[in-house]
Image: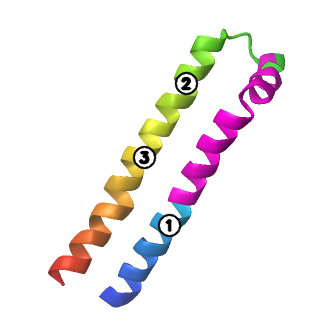
Amino acid sequence: MNLEVVRAFLGWSAVLNILFLSLWFLAFTLAHDWIFSLHRRWFRIPRETFDAIHYAGMAWYKVALWLFFLIPYIVLRLCV
């Protein structure tokens, strides 16, 4: 496997993960009440806790996206 394949893999993985994160954010903001009522059936959590869980999940996902896909892609793009 050469570096061009790794670079392409990291680039497309970053794009797909950014799309997933964007869809998650859009669904959370546009369908917040419906998603909350769906989860409320399974778990008894207050709305503030539900919001905090989702925002923390999005934040961790974004950090992982930078660490595992975007930074290695940028480094391979600039240095190699």
| CB under 8 Å between discs 1 and 2 | no
Closer to the camera in the image, 26 or 36: 26
Residue 3 in the figure: left or right of residue 9: left
Quarter-of-image position of residue 41: top right
Q: Which of marks 1 and 3 is nearer the N terminus?
A: 1
Residue under label 3, please give it. Answer: 62
Out of 35 and 57, give the one closest to the viewer: 35
Is residue 54 placed above or below 8 in the rendered structure?
Answer: above
**SS assignment for the magenta stretch, majority:** helix
Q: Name the residue under label 2.
A: 53
Q: How far apart are marks 1 and 3 (CA)?
A: 12 Å
Q: In this view, does 55 lie to the left or right of 67?
A: right
Q: Nearer the viewer, mark 1 or mark 2?
A: 1
Colour basis: rainbow
Q: Where is residue 80 in the image (x, y as percent from the top left)?
A: 18, 84
Q: Is mark 2 on a helix, strand or loop?
A: helix
Q: Residue at x 35, y 54 (%)?
A: 66
Magenta stretch contains residue 10 = no
Residue drawn at 64 percent across, 34 percent down: 29
Q: What residue type is labelled 2?
A: Ile
- In this picture, is 17 found above or below 11? above
**Label 3 with label 2: CB-CB less than 8 Å:** no
- The kind of residue tagged 1 is Val
Q: Name the residue under label 1.
A: 15
Tell me the SS state at disc 1.
Answer: helix
Q: In this view, does 51 lie above or below 66?
A: above
> Which one is nearer the viewer's eye here, 6 or 31?
31
Crowding near pointer 1: few (<14 within 10 Å), some, many (20+)?
some
Asked whether, in this view, residue 7 is left or right of residue 74, the answer is right
Distance in Å between CA atoms under marks 3 and 2:
14 Å
Residue 23 percent location from the top left of the image: 64, 50
Range drawn in magenta: 18-40
